Amino acid sequence: MTDTDIKTQLADAMAQDFERDLRRDNLPPEKIQAQLKRSRDRITSAPVAILLCLDMSEMDSYPDEKRNKAEYMMAVQSTAAAGMQLLLATHAEGLGGVWACWPLFAQETIRTTLNLSDSWEPQGIFFIGHSEVIPDARQRKPIEETAIYK
């Protein structure tokens, strides 16, 4: 999405779901408004917003729930891998990219707002553009604490 009007429509529609959820969480009104503003700004200010969706219509179907669940997880993993490739390609082009998963909380709202197929399940949204600030790398745990070698 590059059209400002479309990004604004999406931001406004998602804000309604987000505000409802934040009220349920009993957040103070000023915190709710701050989070809504941040969310809207992220969507509307990025030069490009890319919505990543999962589509099960081409996946295999099985007679049992266990394999159908595994097939769905494979689709989720494949979608996430595609998102990571998108971020790597963005970086290779000298651009900045941020991945947000909050479309998972507003899938129906997003489908309706953008007039998407019912088979498309919004999974994430990527904000692409030139970075204003390049953050310092975060401290990572040593590999020995996160992997097992045998």
Image (spheres, grey):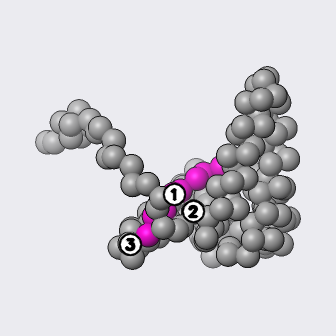
Say which residue label 2 marks: 126
The CA span between labels 1 and 2 is: 5 Å
Task: Tell me where the magenta segment starts and ends, as one range.
Answer: 95-105
Q: Is residue 102 left or right of residue 27?
A: left
Q: Nearer the viewer, mark 3 or mark 2?
A: 3
Q: Position of residue 142 (x, y in %)?
A: 21, 37
Q: Quadrant of residue 95?
A: bottom left
- Position of residue 131 relative to residue 19, above or below, is below
Magenta region includes residue 98: yes
Residue at screen point 52% across, 68% down: 129
The CA span between labels 3 and 2 is: 15 Å
Q: Position of residue 47 (x, y in %)?
A: 61, 70
Among numbered discs 1 and 2, the one appearing first in the sequence: 1
**Please, what secondary structure does the residue beneath circle 2 have?**
strand
Say which residue label 3 marks: 94
Numbered label attached to residue 98? 1
Q: Quadrant of the C terminus?
A: top left
Q: Amino acid at mark 1?
A: Val
**Please, what secondary structure does the residue beneath circle 1 have?**
strand
Mark 2 neighbour class, 10 Å CA radius: few under 14, some 14 to 19, many 20 or more: many
Q: Nearer the viewer, mark 1 or mark 3?
A: 3
Asked whether the beta carbons under mark 1 and mark 2 sit within 8 Å of each other, the answer is: yes
Magenta region includes residue 112: no
Residue at screen point 23% across, 33% down: 145
The CA span between labels 1 and 3 is: 14 Å
Q: Amino acid at mark 3?
A: Gly
In this view, which residue lies farthest toward the left? 150
In this view, which residue lies farthest toward the front? 132
Residue at screen point 73% across, 45% down: 37
Please indicate, yes or no, whether residue 47 appears anywhere in the rendered image: yes
Q: Quadrant of residue 34?
A: top right
